[in-house]
Amino acid sequence: MHIMRTIRTFGGTLAALTLALGTALTALGQPIPGQYIAVFKDDVADPGPAARQLETQHGLAVRHVYQHSVRGFAFAGNAQAAQALARNPRIAYVEQDQLAHTSKAAIPTGVSRIGIDAPLLNAISPAGANVDARIAIIDTGLQRNHPDLNVDPNGVRVITTTTKVKGRNITEITFDNVFDDDNGHGTHVGGTVAANGAIVGVAPGALLTAVKVLSAGGSGPWSYVIAGVDWVAGQPERFDVANMSLGGGYSQAVNDAVKRATDKGIVFVVSAGNASSDVSQVSPASEPSAITVSAMVDYDGAPGGLVSGDYVSCKNADGTGGALHPDEAFACFSNFGAGVDICAPGVRIYSTWPQTLGDQTGYHTISGTSMAAPHVAGAAALYVALNRANRTHTRTWVDEVTAALTSSGWRAGDYGYFDYYTQAGSPRPTGDKDSTREPLLNVSALLGVTSRPDPEIFVTIAEPANNSTVQTGTPVTFTATATWGGMDVTDAIVWTSSRDGVLGNGGSISAALSAGTHSIVAAVPDPVSSFGGAASINVVAGQATPVPKQLFIALSFSKPGDPPVYFDGETMRSYFDVTDELGAPVQDAYVSGTLKTPAGGTLTASGNTDANGRFEASMRLNGKQGGANNYGLWTCSGYATKPDHLRSDTVSRAFELRR
C-alpha cells in the first residue's frame, strides 16, 4: 500500500463496534435493506386477509399486520416487489423501513424546574399515593422490579420470530413479555414520568407499561415502532398517555400510526430529537397530533440563571467539542421549528436506571430531548387523572390536553421562562434557533396553582463601560444600581469576575483585575427565593487573552457522487480540507479520520495537513477483508485540531463498495 507524504492509510481491526451510552446512534433516515412498510387506502376495511393476498400475489414475506393505528403491514422483499406493490390500487403508499433510535445526548435537572415543589407534590401524591394514570413507555423497555417504579407486568417486547409452516419458514413481527430494559434509556424516561420512591417523577406512581421496540443498543426498525404504536392504539381504554423518546428519518407511516392512535384519545408525547435541526425532517416529532417537546438547560431547578457553575459542554460529556451550556438556555442539541409544541428541562436529568447496568445504584444522569419529553408526558398524565370524568376516546380529548399544557406554560417574557432574565442589564442569547418561542412546561399553573408574582429585579451597571480596557493590578471602580418591585436593593449586589471570582458586595466597589478578559457580573439574589436579577459587562485588563481561531473541515472523495461508488480492488482516496474562519487553508492541522465498515468494523488514519490545508488518506478496498462481508455503505468521518485553535466539528460522508 503506497503512502505519500501527507497521506495516511486507514488501519485497524474489523471487529464489531459496540455502541455505548452517550455515543451517536444510527444516523437519521438510515434505511434497512429488504424491509418495507405498506399502508392501505382507507377503503380497505380488513388489512389481514388483504395483506396475505398481496403477499402471495407479489412474492412478499409479511412480517406484521397493522390494524389499529394505520391499516397496513411490514414485509420483507426486494425493491422491485416493493415498487410493484406500490402500484397496487389498494395501496396508499410503500416506504422503506428505517432505524429509529433513542433521543439521548449527553448529561440534567427536572421536576422542580417545571413548578413542582414540596407542597404541590404532597397535593399530587398525598402520603406517597400513586397517581391514577396509565402511561405506555415506547422505548428500550423498563426494569420491571425497580423499587421506584410502578411497572405493569403485562408489558410487551416487539420481536421477529421464524416458524416452520408446511415446510416453509415464516418470519413475522410479533410480541412477547420479555420487556426488561437492557439499555437504560426506557427506565430513565419512566422515572421522570412517574418515579415514586427515593426520587419522584412528575406523576408519582402512575402505572407504566413497557412497549419495548428498541434494542440494547438503543435502536430498532420503524416496523417495530409502528407495531408498538399499533399495540397501544388497539387498547385505548387501557392507556391515557404514550411517551416516545425516540426518533429517526421522516416516515409517513410512523406519523400516520401516531395520528390514528391520537384519534382514539391517547395523548402521544414525543421528543423533538437531538440533531439541532427542524423537526419537520424527522418522525414522529413532525406529526402535528403528537405533543412535540424540545429541551432547555437548567442546573438548579429554578428560574433566574446561575451566574456561574459547573456547566456542561454543548456537544460532549467529556467537555470537548463545543461551547459550554449556560444555565437557562435552549439546549444546543435540541431540534426546533414550528412543529415544536412545548419545551421542558433536558440537560443533566437525574432519574431511575436499571440496577443491573452502570454503577448498579439504580439511578443515572443523562441529557437529551428524550429526557425533556417525559416531563410533559407526566404532566399530561396528571391532567388526565384530575379530569378523568371528562375523558373521551377521541382526538378532541387529545387536543384539550395539548391546549391545557401549552396554554398554562411560561411564555417569552414571563419570569419563569428561560429568557426572562435577559431583560435586566446586558441581554444574553437564549440559544433558541428560530422565531418560534414555544411555551415552557409549568405544572403548577396546569394544576391551577397561582405562581408568585414577577420578582422584577433589575440590575444596571453604571461603570465601567462595557468592553473597557484597564491596567492590570490598578484598582477599578465598579458601580451599579438594582431595584426589586420598585424597592432599592442596590446594597444586595454581588460582584463576580469570570477570572478572579468574587470581587465584592454593594452598589460601588473597588477591585484590581488580573491580566486577561473578564466577564464582570453584578447579581442580586431574590429576597424571597432563589430567583434573582443580573447584569454583565466585559472588561479587558492588560493584554487580553487571544481568541482561538475556529477550524472548519470538509470531506471529499476521489470519485464523484453522493455517495460515490467504488468497486472491489479499487483505491479509495479521501480528502480532508481544513480552513479557518476566513476560508484560508490551515497548514499543519492534525486530522483524525475514521472509517466504519458495513460489517461494524472501524479503521483509522491521522496526520497533518499540507500547505494547501489538505490531508489525504487512501485504502485499497477489499469487501472480504477480515473474513467479513463489507459490501455496502462505508462511513468516513474526521475532525481537525491545532494548538491555539478551536477544534472543528466532525465531518462525515458515506461511500458505497460494490463487488
Image (cartoon, rainbow, N blue to C red):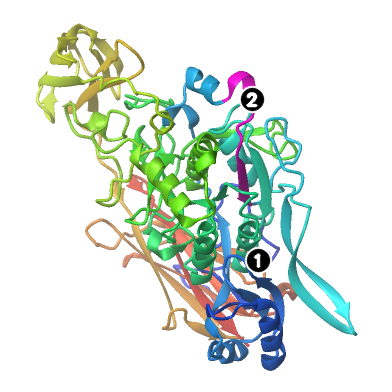
**Can you say whether 20 is above or below 261 in the image?**
above
Which element carries disc 1, helix, strand or loop? loop
399 and 429: which is toward the camera? 399
Q: Which residue is label 2 attached to? A: 129
- Quadrant of the drawing holding the C terminus: bottom right
Q: Secondary structure at mark 2?
A: loop
- Decide: is 484 above or below 175: above
Neighbour class for label 1 at 10 Å: few (<14), some, many (≥20)? some
Q: Position of residue 366 (x, y in %)?
A: 54, 39
Residue 397 among those drawn in magenta: no
Label 1 sits on what residue type? Answer: Gly
**Residue 331 in sight in this render:** no
Question: Bounds of the magenta span?
Answer: 125-138
Q: Which residue is mark 1?
A: 600
Q: Residues within 10 Å of mark 2 (few under 14, many from 20)?
A: some
Q: To which quarter of the image does residue 325 belong?
A: top left
Q: Does label 1 or label 2 sit earlier along the sequence?
A: 2
